[in-house]
Amino acid sequence: MFVPPQYREPNGSWMVNLMRRNPLALCVTNGDANEGPFATHLPVIRDPRLSQDWTEDLSGGSLLGHMNLHNPHWAALRTGDPVLLVFTGPHAYVSPTVYEKTPAAPTWDFTAVHVHGTIEKIVSAEDTLEVVKATVRSFEDDLGTGWDMAESEGYFHQLLPGVGAFRIAVTGAEGMFKLSQEQEPHVRERVRDSFAQRPCGRHRETAQLIAQLP
């Protein structure tokens, strides 16, 4: 991903936070000349086995995910294949009226993280179940209502024949946080205030990120 210097994340924690708050990633791998690339939207979490902090470019980290076993993407995957995960964060259209100057051009503020790595297909049913349970725990802690999965584990076992789990060894990542940094500070403040007043949640989230810029 091409990231102009002014749009790079202030530090690696911005990428980690975006991934945690927007865990539905687009998983992209190469296909052959006839099939072309494969792309699947799926939830991804940090591997709970990891105890160390993320590095600045996320290299050395590990992520877990799963997809429908009947998805042709799963059949095409091979352990060791390179993979790209695309996480999309808050984004919003910027109308030139906010700039209060002419000439001007519209643009789109947006945030995204591209994670590169290699994939390991998980073949054990027990390990696949652990990926599913770890995913539930992660999302219930961050995004849910504290649902207790204990009474549903039998149902999870019934679903396992249709689940393909995997681990991704992260080799690096790039973050794009295009938040009107190219504008003068007073103009950027107008963009932030304009977003903050919108009823749409992603506009307000984008305004919050602009406010956090150093």
Image (spheres, helix red, strand yellow):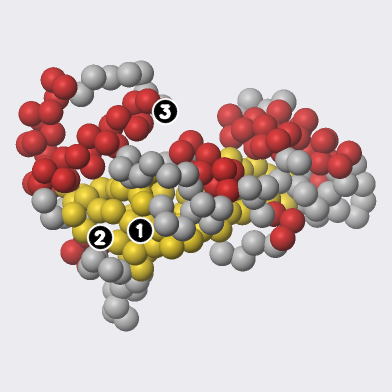
Placement of 55 over or under 89, stated as above or below:
below
Question: Pointer 1 and pointer 2: residues touching (CB < 8 Å)?
Answer: yes
Q: Height in image: 58 above or below 18?
A: below
Q: Can residue 114 be seen from the camera position used here?
A: no
Q: Position of residue 29 (x, y in %)?
A: 35, 66
Which residue is the site of mark 1?
Answer: 169
First in sequence: mark 1 vs mark 3: 3
- Camera-side residue of 61 and 82: 61
| Residue at x 56% of width, y 64% of height | 1
Q: Which residue, given by chain and number where applicable, does mark 2 sit on?
A: 120
Residue 62 shows up from this direction: yes
Marks 1 and 3, how far apart in space?
23 Å
Residue type at tag 1: Ala
Label 2, secondary structure: give it.
strand
What kind of residue is marked 3? Asp
**Upstream in sequence: badge 1 or badge 2:** 2
Give the image location of residue 115, x and y in percent.
Answer: 46, 57
- Please tell me which residue is depicted at 73% across the width and 40% down the height of the picture: 213
Q: For numbered disc 1, what is the local secondary structure?
A: strand
Q: Is residue 190 left or right of residue 178?
A: right
The extreme bottom residue here reads 33
Q: Nearer the viewer, residue 56 or 163?
A: 56
Where residue 44 is drawn, which disc sits there? none
- Image quadrant occupied by the C terminus: top right
Q: Amino acid at mark 2?
A: Glu
Residue 86 relative to residue 196: left or right: left
The crowding category of the residue bearing disc 1, from other C-alpha atoms within 10 Å (few below 14, some 14 to 19, many at least 20), is many
Instruction: Tell which of 34 and 29 is nearer to you.
Output: 29
Q: Which mark is residue 142?
A: 3
